[in-house]
Amino acid sequence: MSRIDKLNKKLAALDPSFSARDERGCTVLTGESGEWSKIVAAGKLAVDKKHSLGVVNRIKLKGFEQRVPEPAVRDKAYDGTAPDVLVIGGGIVGCAAARTLRRYDLSVMLVERGYDVALGGSSRNGGVVHVGINYSPRAQKHIYNNRGNAMYEGLCRDLGVPFEQKGQVLLIGKRWETILCAVLRLNAKRLHIPGVKFMKREQLVSVEPHIPEWIYGGLYMPTGGITSPYQMTVALAENAVTNGAQICLDTAVEGMRVEEGKIREVFTNRGIIRPKLVINAAGVYSDVIADMAGDRTFTVHPRKGTDIILDKKKGYMVRTSMAKSPTTVPPPLAGEEEMHAGGLKAVVKALHSHTKGIASIHTADGNMIIGPDALEVPDREDTATTAESMDSIFEAQARISEGAGRGDVIAYFAGVRAPTYEEDFVVRKGIFTENILEAAGIQSPGITAAPAIAEDLAKWAAEYIGRSRRVERNAKFDPVRPKKPVLRELSDEERARLIAENPDYGEMICRCEEVSKGEILDALRSPLPVYTVDAVKRRVRPGMGRCQGGFCSPLVVKIIAEERGVSSEEVTKGNLRSRILYGDTKGKEE
Ligand SMILES: Cc1cc2nc3c(=O)[nH]c(=O)nc-3n(C[C@H](O)[C@H](O)[C@H](O)COP(=O)(O)OP(=O)(O)OC[C@H]3O[C@@H](n4cnc5c(N)ncnc54)[C@H](O)[C@@H]3O)c2cc1C
């Protein structure tokens, strides 16, 4: 019986309409079902890394049509442009690629469908710079995570982005669970991850002083870090622009003309672009873009995760990114029955898990985040938060960060990961289409891996364009993005000096996060200015604090309106349709 026959037998048991065939070396699935879980299960069944390039799951979910936000503008602004490299997607991967491409004398254009960069997964995550201890040595996730992790400190220094490297901790409750720690330590050695060690509770409290009494110990992994993922994405984009890349916002790729294995034209809502090479960094839509380009060998099955942000006053409770092992069951509370761990089975399951589990994370801005969970969803745009997710996250974490409760929550959000069924990144040169590079299926640890992925993409792009003309290194490339003043980081003397030089730094706009008018103006006068309330929030944090913008939002609107020379009614929260003000409620004084 052939591989496909065997698979078809299994698929038919799942749903009689499901079937598989081999097409160009990929396993293509077709059929129809009313249950998303069955469609995902079929995709997982079809994985065969040895004999297939990947799973292309075309099984339809009955009654579901992916809604894609209609572009806010339609014009010919970029019609006829012909860059060397067109990057699709303004997440961390696309922005890192655009910047790194400018290390070579290549003309670079990045198109992003949204009104800003960092609107997809790159702004909806915990910002952990991962250690990557449970990957297989052959996985792209491992290779890029290791390289990316090592690049972070220098990159954050160059770009003026927050970075702390206080480690990651995996907590265990019982002595027998040290088996898992021992296996993970061996894996760390195999993966060349330095410094990983087991610590008993007495030692571990020097790293995490607020762990609960019942914790036996934990695996301490010193190379774990934390950054601000959206600030990093914005910084990469700004530095790319400073170095000559063109970033085109509100620009969506809607189709391509591919002839003789080459992308000839890329259709957007702002005209036709004719690039020599395309980089696919479109996040949860990376399989859709690969399809347009005729280069698809994989499928993204969206996996939603919710994170909960707690007030800064609870920030002291965690210094690292700390999670309990999936094998760990906290002792019962009064009146509860004792739960039993799954023993060795649970250890094996933990080692094969594709998500890192729910953690307490110390953020780069001093808050505590708890989350994320992991839910398979059909809708790539599903960033709705639900009471069920919140409850399950609180339940999972309540016994780790005892003393943090629902009253400490200041915000919550959901993001959508972009896993393939193979659960690995797809970073490669085009297989069926000559002039495309794929940076697809970049689920976690994509924040960590992005700088390393960008290095390879830029190198391959220079080689490809180098086939038709000489490509030199760009001697003028400047990796440094000068850091603008951040008032809350300054001493009283430094603040006084700054305010004397420029009184705008003395006008406090956001009291929770201590953000001055001067800092907001700096953001609006940056190399990639975006004149919306949320864009300012992502850059310099007004509205990120306890009151969530209740006090400062009207002031931010006023500053943006003055800076642009428009009325307050024209200032939006996010995209052009997200109006905040419609007019006066009381008559204006004559
Ligand atoms: C809940 C959650 C927690 C996570 N935690 C971590 C973590 O702690 N550490 C870590 O390393 N990673 C983490 N990740 C993973 C990380 O966020 C992603 O891997 C990373 O952000 C992916 O970046 P990207 O640039 O590939 O995609 P995105 O950031 O999604 O960017 C893709 C962009 O492409 C644009 N686009 C799509 N289609 C088109 C089109 N047709 N035309 C133009 N533009 C288009 C989109 O608008 C989007 O802006 C987490 C992810 C989630 C969801």
Image (cartoon, rainbow, N blue to C red):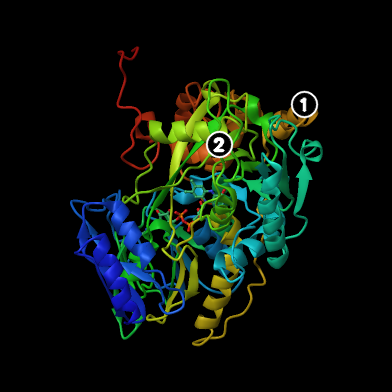
Q: Are marks 1 and 2 in contact (CB under 8 Å)?
A: no
Q: Is residue 256 above or below residue 492?
A: below
For the question of whether residue 541 can be seen, the reply is no
* Amino acid type, callout 1: Asp
Q: Is residue 413 above or below residue 73?
A: above
Helix, strand or loop at mark 2: strand
For disc 1, the marked residue is 492
Left/right placement of residue 575 relative to residue 318 reads: left
* Amino acid type, callout 2: Ile
Left/right placement of residue 558 relative to residue 289 reads: right
Helix, strand or loop at mark 1: helix
- Whole-percent x and y of residue 234? 54, 50
**Closer-to-camera residue (517/388):** 388
Residue 513 falls in image quadrant? top right
**Closer-to-camera residue (365/563):** 365
Say how many tags the image has.
2
For the question of whether residue 18 can be seen, the reply is yes
For disc 2, the marked residue is 370
Q: Which image quarter holds the N terminus?
A: bottom left
**Closer-to-camera residue (501/85):** 85
Residue at (32%, 75%) from the top-left corner?
Answer: 6
- Whole-percent x and y of residue 281? 45, 63
Compute the Cα span from label 1 to label 2. Answer: 33 Å
